[in-house]
Image (tube, rainbow, N blue to C red):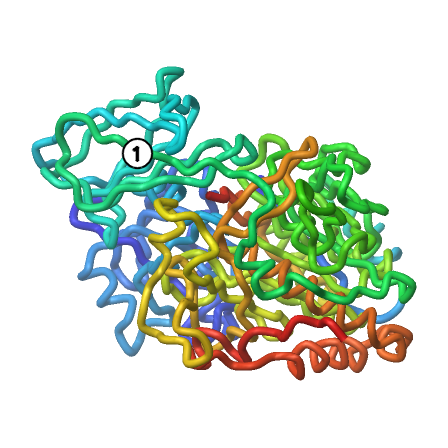
Amino acid sequence: MERYTLYYRGQGSPAGDAAMIAATPGLRVIDHEVERAMLVEAEPGTIERVRARFPQWMVSREAYYPRPEPQ
Amino acid sequence: MADSERYIILPRQGVRARRPVELETLQQFPSTSSMGPSKTFRLDALGVDVSVVDTVAESSAKLVDISPEAAARLNAPDSPVRALKEVFYPLPQPAEGTVDAAATAVAAAAPTTAASTFKVEVSNAQTGAPIGGCKVSAFSDFQNRIGTVGFTDAAGTVTLSLPAAVVERITANPEPGNGFWSGYLRNVPASGVLKIKVPPFAMPYTDCVRHYFGATNFVAATGVVVGVIDTGCGPHADLNIIGGRNTVTGEPAGAISDGQYHGTHVAGLVGARGTAPNGVRGLAPGVGINAYRVFGANARGASNYAILKAMIHAANDECDIINLSLGGGPHNEIVEEAIVDARNQGMLVVIAAGNGYRAAVSFPAAYSGATAVSAMGREGTVPPGSAEELQIVRPPYSTADALEFIAGFSNVGPQIAVTGPGVGAISTLPNNRIGPLSGTSMAAPVIAGAATCLLSQNPGVHGMIRDRTRSAAIERLLQASCAQRGFGLVFEGLGLPQSPTV
């Protein structure tokens, strides 16, 4: 299972979409603290289906920026 | 897979399959993750063996190990996919990597040459007392980052080895806030005992930030709010933390204190309200700061999700200016889009260009909509013998002040919007400490602080509807205040803001 960041780019409330995404079989919501963003866990095939079904949500694998280590 | 090399498999055009034959081919690749084992299979249609290392999506990129012959076959005109060699962004280093992080990253890359072992003694340049717990980074080939790292013991000593007879450069960096600058030696034998004397730090001191911005005019009544997206902020009595949030998944939302020291230093450069002789003054003393902590206590870094959440919260909290002193790593469309959204909601987004030693401006600073900041310094604003002297690199030359320089560690490129002082910048550290740090991470909040002052002096702009026009107006205030120093566009963009004293 991989983790993905979803970001709502559409107009209006994303609540309906978010509920349907959360109900997708094989997908687990890890964090949905803000309405327009979700952190989910799913297999690549599952997330591809979400991407196709909900085009107003931008989907990207969770990525990291390194911790700053000042001099 | 013998004699294999790493490639990225993509459709013939773009990154997502558009044609059925492309999708059909890409779907044959078994899915795997970067954390799991690779999976080997044969792509019968093209007659090649492929070891799949990582997959992004069924219809998109695959990271694979394949032979050069297989790559050639995949790139043949009749192939529905293409194979591109994997490439790496130069030094995807922490924001303030400078010497330390570079050494950490490359110690394992040293070639197998006969090692020279030497002892390092680190001491206070004034008293001669040993400095324990000091990070020592030694390079035999700095350009190729061949080096090693160690920490001094209570006697101020550490033994290191390098695959060379000469140490090209060696730096000693005491723990930030422990009352020291940093020390260094250059081109010394990798044998015997190397003695590094570290200048002690004491206030008052006119660093590069106060040299340029010693007397700024911040109008608190305008109500400007700055968001600092970082390691958290404080505690520090001289910071006016009015809110914020921890956006790291799994951590309490209210845990916004600094998990390291970086965010506190950044926040202080924007708005510390300390007073002479022992305190430190930021550019906008006492400005309200929202601290968004995106680096978790034990995380490997700040995730794109944590940054996205922080930027959404910053908009909801009506921040006017947000500072991101972080960067490195590959392009990420989520963070790019979050910056666009932040701009569309009226905020100026100031981002450190990165410390890749003249590498290209790192992401997210390189995104359109970001105000990317390079770091400059000035001779005479750090004590003699401090390692900050290593950052004096010319060309390019300033035509405004012969003592100025673009910091050796600073990334540069056409995306640079402005430059700011970031070599030996003094600011707040957690638990009411003060100390110097260097990096584009320091230059960015100086610029954020300058923009804060300018916005505070222009209530008409501050009162605009929070949209792209507003963020553009804030950007123009900053741009109009800048004067080029003669370094050239790729190094300084529009130059250094004039101190907003009016």
> Residue B358 versus residue A71: which sits nearer the camera?
A71
**Residue at position x 73%, y 80% from top?**
B472
Instruction: Provide residue B409's location: percent of width, then percent of height.
Output: 40, 57
Crowd tier of the residue under label 1, counting other residues whose Cα lies within 10 Å: few below 14, some 14–19, many 20 or above: many
- Above or below, comparing residue B175 to residue B359 in the picture: above
Q: Is residue B149 left or right of residue B233?
A: left
Instruction: Provide residue B60's location: percent of width, then percent of height.
Output: 49, 62
Instruction: Provide residue B164's location: percent of width, then percent of height.
Output: 12, 39
| Residue type, mark 1 in image | Ile
Q: Quadrant of the N terminus of chain A?
A: top right
> Residue B428 versus residue B103: which sits nearer the camera?
B428
One can see residue A41 in this view: no
Q: Is residue B174 left or right of residue B192?
A: right
Which residue in the protein does label 1 denote?
A: B196
> Residue B5 versus residue B260: which sits nearer the camera?
B260
The image quadrant that residue B245 belongs to is top right
Q: What's the chain of the residue with tag 1?
A: B
- Above or below, comparing residue B39 to residue A18 in the picture: above
One can see residue B97 in this view: yes
Secondary-structure class at tag 1: strand
The image quadrant that residue B285 belongs to is bottom right
Labels in figure, total? 1
Instruction: Provide residue A22's location: percent of width, then percent of height.
Output: 78, 46
The residue at the far top in this view is B154
**Residue at position x 37%, y 60% from top?**
B408
Q: Is residue B331 left or right of residue B311?
A: left
**Residue at position x 46%, y 66% from top?**
B361
**Residue at position x 67%, y 58% from top?**
B323
